[in-house]
Amino acid sequence: MFPENGIFNFEKHSRVQQIIFVSLLIVCLTGIISPPIALLLGLLVANISGHPWLHLNHKIIHVLLQVSVVGLGFGMNVTNALHSSKEGFILTVVTLFSTILLGTFLGKWLKTDKKTSHLISCGTAICGGSAIAAITPVIKSDEKQTSVALGVIFILNSIALFLFPTIGHWLELSQEDFGLWCALAIHDTSSVVGAANKYGSLALQIATTVKLARALWIIPIVLLTSFLFKNKTSKIKIPYFIGFFILAMIVNTYVPQAAIVTPYIVSIAKIGLTVTLFFIGSGLSSSVLLAVGIKPLIQGILLWGFIASLSLIAILYLN
Protein backbone atom coordinates (compact mmCIF):
# COMPACT_ATOMS: atom_id res chain seq x y z
CA MET A 1 0.00 0.00 0.00
CA PHE A 2 2.88 2.38 0.81
CA PRO A 3 5.81 2.86 -1.57
CA GLU A 4 9.36 2.37 -0.42
CA ASN A 5 9.88 6.01 0.52
CA GLY A 6 7.00 5.76 2.98
CA ILE A 7 4.87 8.44 1.28
CA PHE A 8 1.27 7.52 0.55
CA ASN A 9 0.06 8.60 -2.90
CA PHE A 10 -3.50 9.83 -2.31
CA GLU A 11 -4.07 10.65 -5.98
CA LYS A 12 -3.76 6.94 -6.84
CA HIS A 13 -6.29 6.08 -4.13
CA SER A 14 -9.18 8.42 -4.89
CA ARG A 15 -11.53 6.56 -2.52
CA VAL A 16 -9.27 7.30 0.46
CA GLN A 17 -8.93 10.90 -0.72
CA GLN A 18 -12.73 11.25 -0.87
CA ILE A 19 -13.24 9.68 2.56
CA ILE A 20 -10.78 12.09 4.18
CA PHE A 21 -12.37 15.09 2.46
CA VAL A 22 -15.95 14.11 3.33
CA SER A 23 -15.01 13.29 6.93
CA LEU A 24 -13.49 16.74 7.49
CA LEU A 25 -16.43 18.35 5.70
CA ILE A 26 -18.80 16.63 8.13
CA VAL A 27 -16.73 17.95 11.04
CA CYS A 28 -17.19 21.47 9.65
CA LEU A 29 -20.92 20.87 9.26
CA THR A 30 -21.31 19.99 12.94
CA GLY A 31 -20.59 23.59 13.93
CA ILE A 32 -18.13 22.54 16.64
CA ILE A 33 -15.14 24.21 15.00
CA SER A 34 -14.49 27.89 14.23
CA PRO A 35 -14.08 29.36 10.69
CA PRO A 36 -10.28 29.77 11.09
CA ILE A 37 -9.91 26.11 12.06
CA ALA A 38 -12.05 25.12 9.07
CA LEU A 39 -9.71 27.11 6.83
CA LEU A 40 -6.70 25.31 8.35
CA LEU A 41 -8.33 21.92 7.77
CA GLY A 42 -8.90 22.91 4.15
CA LEU A 43 -5.26 23.92 3.76
CA LEU A 44 -4.16 20.56 5.19
CA VAL A 45 -6.43 18.71 2.77
CA ALA A 46 -5.14 20.75 -0.19
CA ASN A 47 -1.48 20.06 0.60
CA ILE A 48 -1.59 16.53 2.02
CA SER A 49 -4.40 14.38 0.64
CA GLY A 50 -5.72 16.71 -2.08
CA HIS A 51 -9.18 17.92 -3.10
CA PRO A 52 -11.05 15.12 -4.95
CA TRP A 53 -13.57 17.53 -6.53
CA LEU A 54 -11.37 20.55 -7.16
CA HIS A 55 -13.08 21.34 -10.48
CA LEU A 56 -16.30 22.12 -8.58
CA ASN A 57 -14.64 24.17 -5.85
CA HIS A 58 -15.10 27.67 -7.26
CA LYS A 59 -18.80 27.18 -8.00
CA ILE A 60 -19.44 25.68 -4.54
CA ILE A 61 -17.68 28.60 -2.81
CA HIS A 62 -19.62 31.13 -4.90
CA VAL A 63 -23.07 29.67 -4.12
CA LEU A 64 -22.39 28.72 -0.51
CA LEU A 65 -20.99 32.12 0.41
CA GLN A 66 -23.97 33.97 -1.04
CA VAL A 67 -26.52 31.72 0.66
CA SER A 68 -24.68 32.03 3.99
CA VAL A 69 -24.53 35.83 3.77
CA VAL A 70 -28.25 36.02 3.03
CA GLY A 71 -28.88 33.77 6.04
CA LEU A 72 -26.87 36.11 8.28
CA GLY A 73 -29.25 38.90 7.22
CA PHE A 74 -31.98 37.24 9.30
CA GLY A 75 -30.01 38.19 12.40
CA MET A 76 -29.61 41.88 11.58
CA ASN A 77 -31.63 45.05 12.09
CA VAL A 78 -32.33 47.48 9.24
CA THR A 79 -31.85 50.63 11.35
CA ASN A 80 -28.49 49.48 12.70
CA ALA A 81 -27.38 48.38 9.25
CA LEU A 82 -28.20 51.76 7.71
CA HIS A 83 -26.29 53.51 10.47
CA SER A 84 -23.26 51.28 9.94
CA SER A 85 -23.31 51.74 6.16
CA LYS A 86 -23.61 55.51 6.48
CA GLU A 87 -20.74 55.59 8.96
CA GLY A 88 -18.43 53.69 6.63
CA PHE A 89 -19.41 55.45 3.38
CA ILE A 90 -16.71 58.14 3.27
CA LEU A 91 -14.00 55.71 4.36
CA THR A 92 -15.20 53.28 1.69
CA VAL A 93 -14.90 55.86 -1.08
CA VAL A 94 -11.47 57.11 0.04
CA THR A 95 -9.91 53.67 0.57
CA LEU A 96 -11.46 52.20 -2.58
CA PHE A 97 -10.20 54.74 -5.10
CA SER A 98 -6.85 55.33 -3.39
CA THR A 99 -6.19 51.57 -3.39
CA ILE A 100 -6.96 51.20 -7.09
CA LEU A 101 -4.81 54.23 -7.92
CA LEU A 102 -1.90 52.95 -5.82
CA GLY A 103 -2.32 49.49 -7.34
CA THR A 104 -1.91 50.97 -10.82
CA PHE A 105 1.37 52.64 -9.85
CA LEU A 106 2.65 49.55 -8.02
CA GLY A 107 1.85 47.38 -11.04
CA LYS A 108 3.93 49.65 -13.29
CA TRP A 109 6.75 49.88 -10.75
CA LEU A 110 6.91 46.11 -10.23
CA LYS A 111 6.27 45.50 -13.95
CA THR A 112 3.39 43.19 -13.11
CA ASP A 113 1.18 42.11 -16.00
CA LYS A 114 -1.32 44.96 -16.55
CA LYS A 115 -4.48 42.85 -16.36
CA THR A 116 -3.26 40.84 -13.37
CA SER A 117 -2.33 44.08 -11.62
CA HIS A 118 -5.79 45.57 -12.21
CA LEU A 119 -7.54 42.43 -10.96
CA ILE A 120 -5.46 42.43 -7.76
CA SER A 121 -6.12 46.15 -7.22
CA CYS A 122 -9.88 45.79 -7.68
CA GLY A 123 -10.01 42.63 -5.58
CA THR A 124 -8.19 44.39 -2.75
CA ALA A 125 -10.24 47.57 -3.04
CA ILE A 126 -13.76 46.12 -3.27
CA CYS A 127 -14.60 42.55 -2.33
CA GLY A 128 -11.97 40.04 -3.32
CA GLY A 129 -13.01 37.16 -5.54
CA SER A 130 -16.42 38.66 -6.40
CA ALA A 131 -14.79 41.81 -7.79
CA ILE A 132 -12.27 39.75 -9.78
CA ALA A 133 -15.10 37.64 -11.22
CA ALA A 134 -16.93 40.79 -12.31
CA ILE A 135 -13.83 42.48 -13.78
CA THR A 136 -12.44 39.41 -15.60
CA PRO A 137 -14.82 39.43 -18.63
CA VAL A 138 -14.51 43.21 -18.96
CA ILE A 139 -10.73 43.21 -19.41
CA LYS A 140 -10.79 39.77 -21.11
CA SER A 141 -8.10 38.34 -18.85
CA ASP A 142 -6.95 34.78 -19.53
CA GLU A 143 -7.13 31.88 -17.08
CA LYS A 144 -3.59 32.37 -15.76
CA GLN A 145 -4.06 36.10 -15.09
CA THR A 146 -7.33 35.45 -13.27
CA SER A 147 -5.90 32.52 -11.28
CA VAL A 148 -2.87 34.53 -10.15
CA ALA A 149 -5.08 37.40 -8.95
CA LEU A 150 -7.42 35.01 -7.12
CA GLY A 151 -4.44 33.22 -5.60
CA VAL A 152 -3.04 36.47 -4.17
CA ILE A 153 -6.42 37.46 -2.74
CA PHE A 154 -7.13 34.06 -1.17
CA ILE A 155 -3.64 33.78 0.36
CA LEU A 156 -3.98 37.18 2.06
CA ASN A 157 -7.58 36.43 3.06
CA SER A 158 -6.39 33.32 4.86
CA ILE A 159 -3.77 35.31 6.77
CA ALA A 160 -6.30 38.05 7.62
CA LEU A 161 -8.66 35.56 9.23
CA PHE A 162 -6.07 34.89 11.94
CA LEU A 163 -4.20 38.20 11.99
CA PHE A 164 -7.02 40.74 12.31
CA PRO A 165 -8.70 39.43 15.49
CA THR A 166 -5.26 39.23 17.13
CA ILE A 167 -4.44 42.84 16.23
CA GLY A 168 -7.94 43.94 17.23
CA HIS A 169 -7.58 42.49 20.73
CA TRP A 170 -4.04 43.84 21.04
CA LEU A 171 -5.23 47.36 20.19
CA GLU A 172 -8.35 46.86 22.32
CA LEU A 173 -10.62 47.87 19.45
CA SER A 174 -14.33 48.08 20.19
CA GLN A 175 -16.61 45.72 18.27
CA GLU A 176 -17.88 48.69 16.23
CA ASP A 177 -14.36 49.75 15.23
CA PHE A 178 -13.22 46.21 14.53
CA GLY A 179 -16.27 45.43 12.38
CA LEU A 180 -15.70 48.57 10.31
CA TRP A 181 -11.98 47.84 9.97
CA CYS A 182 -12.67 44.28 8.78
CA ALA A 183 -15.12 45.48 6.15
CA LEU A 184 -12.67 48.04 4.79
CA ALA A 185 -9.39 46.14 4.98
CA ILE A 186 -10.09 42.44 4.38
CA HIS A 187 -10.61 41.51 0.75
CA ASP A 188 -13.23 38.77 0.55
CA THR A 189 -16.63 38.68 2.27
CA SER A 190 -15.97 35.18 3.62
CA SER A 191 -12.91 36.24 5.62
CA VAL A 192 -14.56 39.52 6.67
CA VAL A 193 -17.49 37.65 8.17
CA GLY A 194 -15.24 34.93 9.62
CA ALA A 195 -12.92 37.38 11.40
CA ALA A 196 -15.79 39.58 12.64
CA ASN A 197 -17.79 36.59 13.88
CA LYS A 198 -14.79 35.53 15.95
CA TYR A 199 -14.62 39.04 17.48
CA GLY A 200 -18.29 39.42 18.45
CA SER A 201 -21.91 39.65 17.28
CA LEU A 202 -21.93 43.45 16.92
CA ALA A 203 -18.67 43.35 14.95
CA LEU A 204 -20.26 40.72 12.69
CA GLN A 205 -23.31 42.89 11.98
CA ILE A 206 -21.29 46.01 11.18
CA ALA A 207 -18.70 44.15 9.11
CA THR A 208 -21.29 42.34 7.00
CA THR A 209 -23.45 45.37 6.22
CA VAL A 210 -20.53 47.69 5.42
CA LYS A 211 -18.83 45.02 3.28
CA LEU A 212 -21.95 44.34 1.24
CA ALA A 213 -22.54 48.07 0.77
CA ARG A 214 -18.93 48.25 -0.44
CA ALA A 215 -19.57 45.37 -2.84
CA LEU A 216 -22.10 47.51 -4.72
CA TRP A 217 -19.14 49.60 -5.89
CA ILE A 218 -18.46 46.73 -8.31
CA ILE A 219 -20.91 48.40 -10.71
CA PRO A 220 -19.19 51.81 -11.14
CA ILE A 221 -15.73 50.21 -11.03
CA VAL A 222 -16.70 47.80 -13.81
CA LEU A 223 -17.97 50.74 -15.88
CA LEU A 224 -14.73 52.63 -15.25
CA THR A 225 -12.70 49.55 -16.13
CA SER A 226 -14.67 49.10 -19.35
CA PHE A 227 -13.77 52.68 -20.30
CA LEU A 228 -10.07 52.30 -19.41
CA PHE A 229 -9.69 48.98 -21.25
CA LYS A 230 -11.87 50.20 -24.13
CA ASN A 231 -14.34 47.33 -23.89
CA LYS A 232 -17.99 48.27 -24.34
CA THR A 233 -19.46 44.84 -25.02
CA SER A 234 -19.20 43.04 -21.65
CA LYS A 235 -22.16 42.77 -19.32
CA ILE A 236 -21.85 43.83 -15.69
CA LYS A 237 -22.20 41.05 -13.13
CA ILE A 238 -24.36 42.68 -10.47
CA PRO A 239 -24.25 40.97 -7.03
CA TYR A 240 -28.01 40.35 -6.85
CA PHE A 241 -27.73 38.32 -3.65
CA ILE A 242 -27.25 41.60 -1.76
CA GLY A 243 -30.94 42.30 -2.50
CA PHE A 244 -31.90 39.05 -0.77
CA PHE A 245 -29.67 40.01 2.17
CA ILE A 246 -31.55 43.32 2.50
CA LEU A 247 -34.88 41.48 2.25
CA ALA A 248 -33.77 39.12 5.04
CA MET A 249 -32.96 42.12 7.27
CA ILE A 250 -36.36 43.66 6.54
CA VAL A 251 -38.13 40.43 7.50
CA ASN A 252 -36.11 40.15 10.71
CA THR A 253 -36.81 43.79 11.64
CA TYR A 254 -40.48 44.19 10.71
CA VAL A 255 -41.99 40.69 10.92
CA PRO A 256 -42.10 39.71 14.62
CA GLN A 257 -43.36 36.19 13.82
CA ALA A 258 -40.09 35.47 12.01
CA ALA A 259 -38.30 35.40 15.38
CA ILE A 260 -39.46 31.79 15.73
CA VAL A 261 -37.14 30.60 12.97
CA THR A 262 -34.54 33.34 12.42
CA PRO A 263 -32.12 32.16 15.17
CA TYR A 264 -31.97 28.75 13.48
CA ILE A 265 -31.40 30.30 10.05
CA VAL A 266 -28.54 32.41 11.42
CA SER A 267 -26.97 29.36 13.08
CA ILE A 268 -27.13 27.41 9.81
CA ALA A 269 -25.70 30.41 7.94
CA LYS A 270 -22.71 30.54 10.29
CA ILE A 271 -22.07 26.85 9.68
CA GLY A 272 -22.35 27.57 5.95
CA LEU A 273 -19.66 30.21 6.31
CA THR A 274 -17.42 27.74 8.16
CA VAL A 275 -17.87 25.21 5.36
CA THR A 276 -17.15 27.94 2.77
CA LEU A 277 -13.80 28.66 4.40
CA PHE A 278 -13.01 24.93 4.42
CA PHE A 279 -13.58 24.86 0.65
CA ILE A 280 -11.46 28.00 0.18
CA GLY A 281 -8.60 26.41 2.11
CA SER A 282 -8.92 23.14 0.20
CA GLY A 283 -8.30 25.03 -3.04
CA LEU A 284 -4.99 26.53 -1.90
CA SER A 285 -2.56 23.76 -2.76
CA SER A 286 1.19 24.31 -3.00
CA SER A 287 0.92 24.38 -6.80
CA VAL A 288 -1.59 27.25 -6.59
CA LEU A 289 0.65 29.15 -4.18
CA LEU A 290 3.73 28.67 -6.39
CA ALA A 291 1.83 29.75 -9.50
CA VAL A 292 1.12 33.17 -7.99
CA GLY A 293 4.66 34.48 -8.44
CA ILE A 294 6.61 36.96 -6.35
CA LYS A 295 5.69 40.26 -8.09
CA PRO A 296 1.89 39.91 -7.92
CA LEU A 297 2.21 38.74 -4.31
CA ILE A 298 4.37 41.76 -3.39
CA GLN A 299 1.82 44.05 -5.03
CA GLY A 300 -1.00 42.37 -3.10
CA ILE A 301 0.85 42.62 0.22
CA LEU A 302 1.76 46.30 -0.27
CA LEU A 303 -1.80 47.19 -1.27
CA TRP A 304 -3.22 45.24 1.65
CA GLY A 305 -0.81 46.94 4.06
CA PHE A 306 -1.84 50.32 2.66
CA ILE A 307 -5.59 49.83 2.95
CA ALA A 308 -5.34 48.16 6.36
CA SER A 309 -3.14 50.92 7.78
CA LEU A 310 -5.09 53.81 6.23
CA SER A 311 -8.47 52.51 7.37
CA LEU A 312 -7.23 51.69 10.87
CA ILE A 313 -5.69 55.16 11.35
CA ALA A 314 -8.90 56.78 10.08
CA ILE A 315 -11.06 54.70 12.42
CA LEU A 316 -8.87 55.37 15.48
CA TYR A 317 -8.19 59.05 14.98
CA LEU A 318 -10.72 60.54 12.56
CA ASN A 319 -13.90 58.52 12.99
Image (cartoon, rainbow, N blue to C red):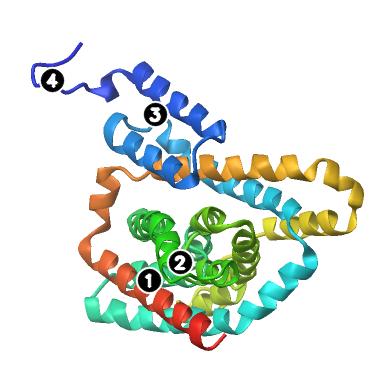
Disc 4 secondary structure class: loop
Question: What crowding class fits label 1: few (fewer than 14 Cα within 10 Å), some (14-19), or many (20 or more)?
Answer: many
Tell me whether the residue at label 4 lies in contact with that at label 3, contact meaning CB atoms closer than 8 angstroms. Answer: no
At a point 63% along the width and 57% down the height, the residue shown is: 201
Q: Quadrant of the N terminus?
A: top left
Label 4 Cα crowd, 10 Å radius (few <14 / some 14-19 / many 20+): few
Q: Earlier in the sequence, mark 3 or mark 2?
A: 3
| Mark 3 residue element | loop
**Identity of the residue drawn at 51% across and 34% down:** 28
Query: Element type at marker 1?
Result: helix
Give the alpha-carbon distance from disc 2 to disc 4, as whole Å: 43 Å
From where the camera sits, is residue 139 visible?
no
Q: Amino acid at mark 3?
A: Pro
CA distance for labels 3 and 2: 36 Å
Picture residue at 70% right of the left edge, 48% below the top:
71
Residue indicated by mark 3: 52
Quote the CA–CA distance across marks 3 and 1. Answer: 32 Å
Q: Residues within 10 Å of mark 2 (few under 14, many from 20)?
A: some
- N-terminal of the pair, mark 4 or mark 3, is 4
54 up-or-down from 171: above or below: above
Q: Report which residue position mark 2 lands on.
A: 168
Q: Which residue is mark 1?
A: 304
In the picture as drawn, the residue positioned furthest to the bottom comes out as 318
Q: Please name the residue that numbered disc 4 is placed on.
A: 6
Contact check, label 3 and label 1, Cβ < 8 Å: no
Q: Quadrant of the C terminus?
A: bottom right
Q: Sequence-wise, which precedes: disc 2 or disc 4?
A: 4
